[in-house]
Image (cartoon, rainbow, N blue to C red):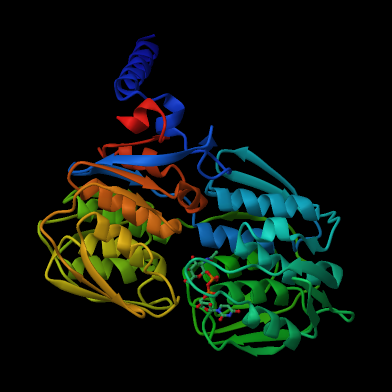
Amino acid sequence: MLDIEILNLTIVRVFCILAMQGLSFNQAYLPRMYGGSRRSGGTLEKIYTMGGRRLVGEIALSGSKNATLAILAGALLPAAGETVLTNVPRISDVQIMCDMLNRLGVKTNFIEQNTLVLDSTNLVSHEAPYELIKKMRASFSVLGPLLARFGRARVALPGGCDIGARPVDFHLKGLEQMGVTITVEHGFVEAIAPNGLVGAKIYLDFPSVGATTHLITAAALAKGTSTITNAAEEPDGISCAAFINRLGGRVEGAGTKTIQIEGVSQLTGADFWMDSDRIEAGTYAVAAAITGGDVYIRGAIEEHVEPATLKLQDSGVDVVFDRGGMRVSAPRPLKATNIKASPHPGFPTDLQPPFAAMLTLADGASVITETVYERRFKYIDELARMGADLKTEGNIAVITGVERLTGAPVAGSDLRATAALILAGLAAQGKSEISGLQYLDRGYEKFAEKLLGVGAELWRADESSEAGRK
Ligand code: UD1
């Protein structure tokens, strides 16, 4: 009885706070799932921040986006049995991948918020249409598994991207080496493997994450053994290999530069737990650091996040790991540091924008060098609109720390850029309004809600609503 009263009181209190902010519960706590940021009556949804609050408390991480996407493509492989994935992040990229799998005949069912059951027994199509591929390039990786199941596949080529050219030549070359005949026509890859896929020795010119995981899944059912040399060492590849092994596959060496895949004749559905998202961990670590806060990030895995946390420590931030996660506490002022974004175990390119936001307030000059993508500095001009001092030349950005940022309207141009601008908004004086939530929702589960839980002042609303105009 007492518990119910306390619960009622809490609910009343939450609604009172929201009413004071002019928000509905939905606006504040539930990001628009799967549709990207909502436009109603031609208006745009944004996140609004009032900067200056020190973040204190605990944030629980969701499952890894990139590992989940690679594993969902691999979930096409079992011709028998159900696959049960736990700790799956509820983000729009995962929904797009599920839509793709449904189109191919896979049954997908979220039996709990983060538990997904898949059944790939009866595939109905070997064709992946452009309307789905264009929404998310990672869905291109259904090509290899479709070839493994049907001996043929027709998959639309993914288009360009805001952070640089992102070709799929390594994917196609690797498949050709595995005996696949490929023709590219009318924007589609037509691929045929009349005699099935055969094991091959594949060398990647660059340790591409997507090509590595795609070729692991393609080789899992091939005849003979495949070797991928100069493979990506990212934790997402380790998860993908572990998943294939859970299904009955034989993958060795994931997480190193040489991966061996011994093809098996059949894979069977199995249970698998998704590791936490290391990029999400790094993003919230920066949220703590940029606000001079003290946040425990539950679920952070030390080996996965170390390339980023070592750089936080360079900036004077305290990071202490224990079995459950990591505690990030920050002094003021932060110190400048240099960062070079490169393949794992280098500093992750996906954390380059959040770290740049943090370094705008560090004491001294920092240099960021980007080696993975050609154009990943689009957000820099937006940070400058908040009073940051930054310059770019090619793939290098020089950031000179300033005393303070001032709130401004800014626009995110990709997933990590939008997150970085929101973090800058949390540290800036006054109100900021950040658009680009259609990108944010691709990769962060409950972003605003998690930050609200550690004391951030932010809300999500249509720009024309009362909450947006406030
Ligand atoms: C993955 C991640 C993304 C991250 C990136 C680098 C997913 C869903 N996304 O993307 O968040 O930023 O790794 O860590 O896992 N390249 C080629 N030819 C190819 C493939 C890649 O030239 O066939 C180049 C790309 O243009 C890019 C570089 O290799 O410059 C790295 O790309 P890659 O590692 O493949 O990134 P993704 O797997 O697409």
176 to the left or right of 56: right
Residue 217 image point, x, y percent: 68, 71
Instruction: State which quarter of the image contains the C terminus.
Output: top left
276 to the left or right of 228: left
Q: Which residue in the rendered view is the most extreme toward the top?
A: 1
Residue 148 image point, x, y percent: 79, 71
Q: Nearer the viewer, residue 252 or 184?
A: 184
Q: Nearer the viewer, residue 7 or 424?
A: 424
Residue 273 image point, x, y percent: 55, 54
Residue 288 image point, x, y percent: 24, 51
Count up the numbered dots.
0
Residue at the image position 82 percent from the left and 67 percent from the top:
149
Q: Nearer the viewer, residue 398 or 306?
A: 398
Q: Which residue in the rendered view is the most extreme toward the front?
A: 42
- State which quadrant residue 144 falls in: bottom right
In this rendering, the answer to whether 368 lies above or below 179 is above
Q: Nearer the viewer, residue 28 or 330?
A: 28
Residue 326: tell me if it is visible: no
Instruction: State which quarter of the image contains the N terminus.
Output: top left
Residue 244: tell me if it is visible: yes
232 to the left or right of 350: right
- State which quadrant residue 418 falls in: bottom left
In this rendering, the answer to whether 10 lies above or below 358 is above
259 to the left or right of 186: left
